[in-house]
Image (spheres, rainbow, N blue to C red):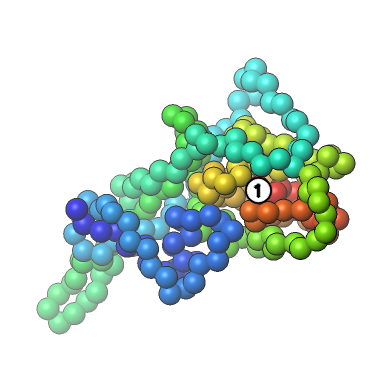
Amino acid sequence: MKHLYLITTKLNCWQLTCDPSEDVQPYELQKVLGNVGRAGITMLVPPKDPIVQQVDASSWQVIENNCFDGKELDCYSKTSLHLSFTEYCVPLYQITQHGRDHGVFFLESVVSVHDSETWIGDVDILKALNDPRVVKMGAITCGHKEQGADHEVMISVEGWPDIIDPPRDQFVVRSYGNWVGRLAAVGMLSQTLTRDGRSVISICPKSVCWKCTLVSRKARVRAFVY
């Protein structure tokens, strides 16, 4: 089986295979077993406008907006990311004295989010991580023994319906310890959150003191990905 190399772009493509909070160096290269079904060099490019599942107004599904309690919980264990290719493939022409070289192609590639067997939508993860609204929260060292958030009212988002149609109030996406769920949530939120003065998406580190975090970030952060 041939190898598929994820090569550096403006944002390192290795960020497609790790937690969104990790810092990836520009020189790092990741090798993934697999192939794209064609010879030569294939440059994977995302679609211009990723498609997201539409909200069904006629659905009777009940969304429970529980309050966030600060506990470490993963509600996205059935989330997965899938790479597929469309039929859009354009050769990169290199004109030489002997003719044209068709050894390099641009292939439109779609990264889709699935919840178990249900398609949720397509995401452009590299574009999302380059979104100025997406920020990485630094670790906070403090003396608080209890780091819960019981005294604050934040919505606990525990399913994809609330990410496709986000709450208007501040909320926390609960995907603790699940890098795939966190990466998918960041990619989807960058597309579904309205672009206004309070649409910052904060990627949480492993350890968070919510008491200190809410004091310093409450005014501008709309979504915490925990």
Q: Position of residue 71 (x, y in %)?
A: 71, 40
| Viewer-proximal residue among 198 and 159 | 159
Q: Secondary structure at mark 1?
A: strand
Q: Is residue 80 left or right of residue 107?
A: right
Instruction: Work out whether residue 69 can be spotted.
Output: yes
* Residue receiving disc 1: 225
Which amino acid is tagged 1? Val
| Viewer-proximal residue among 196 and 169 | 169
Q: Is residue 198 left or right of residue 17?
A: right
Residue found at x 80% / y 61%: 142
Residue found at x 70% / y 49%: 224
Instruction: Work out whether residue 133 can be spotted.
Output: no
Q: Position of residue 58 (x, y in %)?
A: 63, 19
Q: Residue farthest to the bottom?
A: 97
- Mark 1 closeness class: few <14, some 14–19, many ≥20 residues within 10 Å: many
Residue found at x 14% / y 75%: 99
Res 204 → quadrant: bottom right
Q: Position of residue 166 (x, y in %)?
A: 69, 39
Q: Position of residue 117 (x, y in %)?
A: 44, 29
| Viewer-proximal residue among 148 and 124 | 148
Res 155 → quadrant: top right
